[in-house]
Image (cartoon, grey):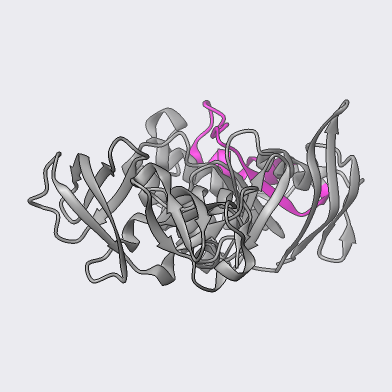
Amino acid sequence: MSGLQLKAVRKSFGSVEVIKGVDLDIKPREFVVFVGPSGCGKSTLLRMIAGLEQITAGELYIGDELMNDVDPSKRGIAMVFQSYALYPHMTVRENMGFALRFAGVSKPEIEKQVLEAARILELEPLLERRPKELSGGQRQRVAIGRAIVRHPEVFLFDEPLSNLDAELRVHMRIELARLHKELRATIIYVTHDQVEAMTLADKIVVLRDGIVEQVGTPLELYDDPDNRFVAGFLGSPKMNFLEGVVDGENLKLPTFGAQTIALGDLAKKLKNGDKVTAGIRPEHFKRGGSAAINVTTELVEHLGGETYAYARHDGGDVLTVAMDDGRELVAGDQVRAEYDLKRVLFFDEAGQRLR
């Protein structure tokens, strides 16, 4: 399998620039996920790799070959779209083998490739069915099988699970992870769902407004984000952001009754009056923490294995707290939300991480 390189890649539609100089190195056999909010440019970037959108500036390499002007059919890629796009009058077998038949591959070879893909995707009992006789998950597996039979250098997935219900999406995530291990393929996968990104990726590329905000493994980005956007985008429930003002060696929180958070060594890099945001993930509130914020619960979610409390201090900002022992907690209870100072992240007024 081949890797990819994007060097200063840009894309403009008229005077509007939507991809603003992306540099990226994807290694062979990596599972890379492009993630970000709607309109961030992730699908446009994927279509540029596929050859469905022209590159305005920069260079795209697949393996060692420059691909800017290479026809999509000759790039060694296969793309799976959000819509299944199966031929309704064809069987599963015929749908999966159509591209090979169109390319003039012999019937015995087509049958061999279709049967191998059907084995990998557990579609063997369904080969004679038509799309209307399949569930959504089965149709998506057929669409993936249609890509597999072509033996591409790179697989491209454009939000392939967004049409499925929640339970089926979980099942298909497992199937895709298994498929990646079996095929040992290079996969680029686009989603706006950070859970899909965290569970599937070897490497995540976080995009915003056509710019790569950060690249790294899921846990690297979760534990060590470069900015407030990445910190807030990854994680469910999302990170709490507490707006504060530097006061000596502490961060004073005006919307939490002027409670404070110690800044530690960062205080030496800041001056009184600087605006700084503290970030604390809900699960980092643990009994026995070295500091605490006093709040009153407004809403409590009991999810069986875990409890989330949504709380405020005197009408200030909402704080989401994961409770280890919150089964007896109800709205209106006073909570001392303890946390470990070492897990708190700090961001400057522009949203960049303070280290």
**Residue 230 relative to residue 208: left or right:** left
Compared across the picture, whether 252 is left or right of 50 comes to: left
In x, y percent, where is residue 171? 36, 51
Kindly identify the residue that appears in the image at 68 percent across and 49 percent down. 78
State yes or no: residue 78 in magenta: yes
Q: Is residue 90 left or right of residue 327?
A: right
Q: In the rendered structure, which segment of residues is drawn in magenta?
A: 74-102
The number of numbered discs placed on residues in the rendered structure image is 0
Image-quadrant location for residue 96: top right
**Image spot of residue 151 (x, y percent):** 67, 58
Q: Quadrant of the C terminus?
A: bottom right
Q: Please name whichever residue, 47 or 127, is drawn nearer the observer in this view of the structure.
A: 47
Along the line of sight, the residue nearer the viewer: 56 or 319: 319
Vertical arrangement, residue 321 with respect to residue 128, above or below: below
Residue 94 magenta-drawn?
Answer: yes
User: Is residue 186 visible in the rendered structure shown here?
Assistant: no
Q: Is residue 101 above or below residue 264?
A: above
Q: Residue at x 86, y 44 (%)?
A: 71
The relative height of residue 327 versus residue 344 in the rendered view (above or below) is above
Residue plotted at (69% across, 69% down): 28
| Residue appearing at x 11%, y 48% in the figure | 329
